[in-house]
Image (spheres, rainbow, N blue to C red):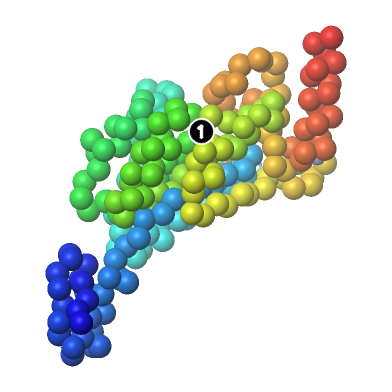
């Protein structure tokens, strides 16, 4: 009888039930997973992403943070509370592999809804290679439609966190994002000056008003 160590080596040492085995046991290998943090604008997705990445760093892991290219001048990721981290801005999710140093254990992905569908395959490959992938992104656009690759990312994820903001119309829990200015575009880059979190009921009555405006 034998066990395989983390590098595939055969371990026949039956004094293994000491600290040595603890180190080379297959159960101690890092398993890959993806965690998707979702919810409306202002629900704390980026704050939670930062918290998760910080925990990994405290545990000795090395983290890389990426985001979609939207604005060339902007190199970091910011929370509404003003915290900031450096990030690599990418056009395509496949470019992650150009930056993936062997010591990187965890890949953070911000604003995942803006990447194309290829992000789903990229996440699966990373997870299969033992990486932890922590994504944050809007599940719904301002019209209440699923946003980009988010439905796929959510269903293939091992873990999902759905956060709520506060409804700016009635103070209830908010799971939707309303656009305060008129536009038919799905993607219109902006912050709280353009968008606000609302609950489902307030979002529905706003949508009805929008549609009435169209008639
Ligand atoms: P997200 O990435 O989901 O847009 P952030 O993590 O950047 O959210 O910011 C969350 C912070 O936004 C909250 O901790 C709070 O200080 C602030 N905030 C502003 N407006 C709201 C709101 N309507 N509901 C909840 N938090 C809000
Ligand atoms: Mg955010
Ligand atoms: Zn409301």
Identify which residue is drawn at 51% across, 54% down. Answer: 159
Q: Residues within 10 Å of mark 1 (few under 14, many from 20)?
A: some
For the N terminus, the image quarter is bottom left
Identify which residue is drawn at 58% across, 31% down. Answer: 147
Q: Is residue 12 above or below residue 112?
A: below
Q: Is residue 39 above or below residue 16?
A: above
Which quarter is ligand 1 in? Answer: top right
Instruction: Residue 41: give x, y in percent of width and height.
Output: 62, 38
Instruction: Residue 7: give x, y in percent of width and height.
Output: 17, 65
Between 181 and 39, the residue placed more toward the observer is: 39
Identify which residue is drawn at 35% across, 60% down. Answer: 31
Q: Is residue 151 above or below residue 35?
A: above
Identify which residue is drawn at 14% across, 69% down. Answer: 9
Direction top: furthest residue = 215
Instruction: Residue 164: give x, y in percent of width and height.
Output: 67, 48
- Residue 46 visible in rendering: no
Between 73 and 140, the residue placed more toward the observer is: 140
Instruction: Residue 50: give x, y in percent of width and height.
Output: 45, 50
- Residue 138 visible in rendering: yes
Residue of label 1: 149
Between 77 and 156, the residue placed more toward the observer is: 156
User: How many labels, in total?
Assistant: 1
- Relative placement, left or right, of 99 versus 207 is left
Q: Quadrant of residue 76?
A: top left
Element type at mark 1: loop
Q: Is residue 173 above or below residue 207?
A: below
Q: Quadrant of residue 165?
A: top right
- Relative placement, left or right, of 183 versus 47 is right
């Amino acid at each position: 009888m034998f066990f395989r160590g983390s590098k595939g080596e055969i371990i026949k040492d039956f004094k293994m039930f000491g600290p040595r085995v603890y180190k080379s046991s297959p159960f101690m290998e890092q398993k890959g997973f993806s965690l998707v943090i979702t919810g409306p604008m202002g629900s704390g997705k980026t704050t939670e992403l930062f918290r998760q990445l910080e925990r990994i760093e405290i545990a000795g892991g090395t983290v890389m943070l990426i985001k979609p290219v939207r604005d060339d001048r902007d190199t970091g990721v910011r929370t509404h509370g003003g915290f900031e981290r450096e990030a690599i801005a990418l056009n395509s999710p496949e470019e992650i592999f150009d930056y993936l140093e062997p010591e990187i254990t965890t890949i953070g992905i911000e604003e995942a809804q803006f990447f194309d569908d290829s992000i789903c395959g990229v996440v699966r490959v990373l997870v299969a290679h033992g990486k932890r992938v922590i994504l944050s992104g809007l599940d719904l656009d301002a019209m209440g439609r699923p946003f980009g690759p988010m439905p796929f990312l959510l269903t293939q994820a091992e873990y999902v966190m759905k956060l709520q903001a506060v409804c700016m119309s009635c103070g209830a829990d908010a799971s939707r994002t309303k656009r305060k200015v008129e536009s038919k575009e799905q993607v219109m880059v902006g912050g709280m000056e353009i968008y606000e979190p609302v609950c489902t009921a307030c979002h529905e009555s706003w949508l009805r008003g929008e549609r009435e405006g169209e008639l």
